[in-house]
Image (cartoon, rainbow, N blue to C red):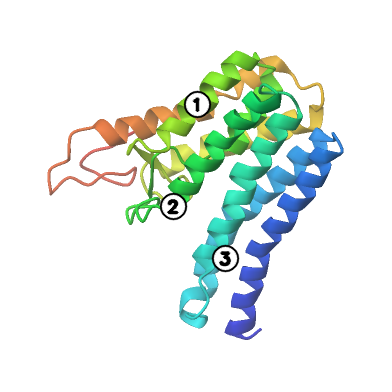
Amino acid sequence: MSPALAAWGVHLYTGLGAATGFFALVAIAQGNYRLAFFWMALATFIDCTDGTLARRVRVKEVLPHFDGSKLDDIVDYLNYVVVPVALAYHAALIPGGVAGLALASLPLLASGYGFCQTEAKTADHFFTGFPSYWNVVIFYFYVLATATWVNTLLLVSFSILVFVPIRYLYPSRSPVARRTTHTLGVLWGVCVVILLAQLPAPSHALGWVSLFFPIYYFALSLHLHFRPAPAPSARWGEGSNTRRLM
């Protein structure tokens, strides 16, 4: 296969995320939330794997005139923001009526601005501000059957956090605690797959247990953000012989 064809194939793979987002919206309109979450999960899988493929076939070198990062951002905004917020409103996970529409607009607006920040993704593989994981937030609203007022408070809080310049770990790119993060991420993924298979009546107990990874992610991100700057000679990461994070 020619390098150009391989590069276009990766871009097509990324673009398929837009199709899964549309399929999820159709499922939401039909009230089939289990199917909608399946499409959202597939979109997340595509997003977690297309970057590795893009680097392997060197898409930026082969197709320098095509901005794959912009395509990725468009697809991500659809699947990480629009689709889960639409599900939250349609499934009555947040208030209905005008108040619900106003509430649903908050993450849409916040993440719209967040995606357009030049430092939304830093060169050292961090997100600046809450990284718009609304698909995960709404998934837990549904699985844990949390009260509407709790969901409202969390939506407002996370929308505000989009603008707070805290650095959050980029799990698939950061070398910091990579083995630990990937191991826990795989275990979390297994829990999510089980919960998806159990829909529309997932185990609340497993749902609460599976929060171990979001809690770990936030705790690690906050630790990295607020820790004192290391000395120039210090090397961070699990492979370092001088200092270890985990």
Residue closest to the eye, 220 or 69: 69
Residue located farthest toward the front when viewing the structure as drawn: 98
- Is 173 on the left or on the right of 147, as rendered? left
Q: Amino acid at mark 1?
A: Val
- Above or below residue 69? Residue 189 is above
Rounded to the nearest angstrom, the CA distance separating label 1 from label 2 is 28 Å
* Nearest-to-viewer mark from 1 and 2: 1
Mark nearer the N terminus (3 vs 1): 3
Which residue in the protein does label 2 denote?
173
Mark nearer the N terminus (1 vs 2): 1
Q: Quarter of the image holding residue 5?
A: bottom right
Which residue in the protein does label 1 denote?
156
Q: Secondary structure at mark 2?
A: loop
Label pair 1/2, CB-CB below 8 angstroms: no
Rounded to the nearest angstrom, the CA distance separating label 3 from label 2 is 13 Å
Q: Secondary structure at mark 3?
A: helix
* Nearest-to-viewer mark from 3 and 1: 1
- Is 31 on the left or on the right of 121, as rendered? right
> Which quadrant is the C terminus positioned in?
top left
Give the crowd class for mark 3: few <14, some 14-19, many >=20 residues within 10 Å: some
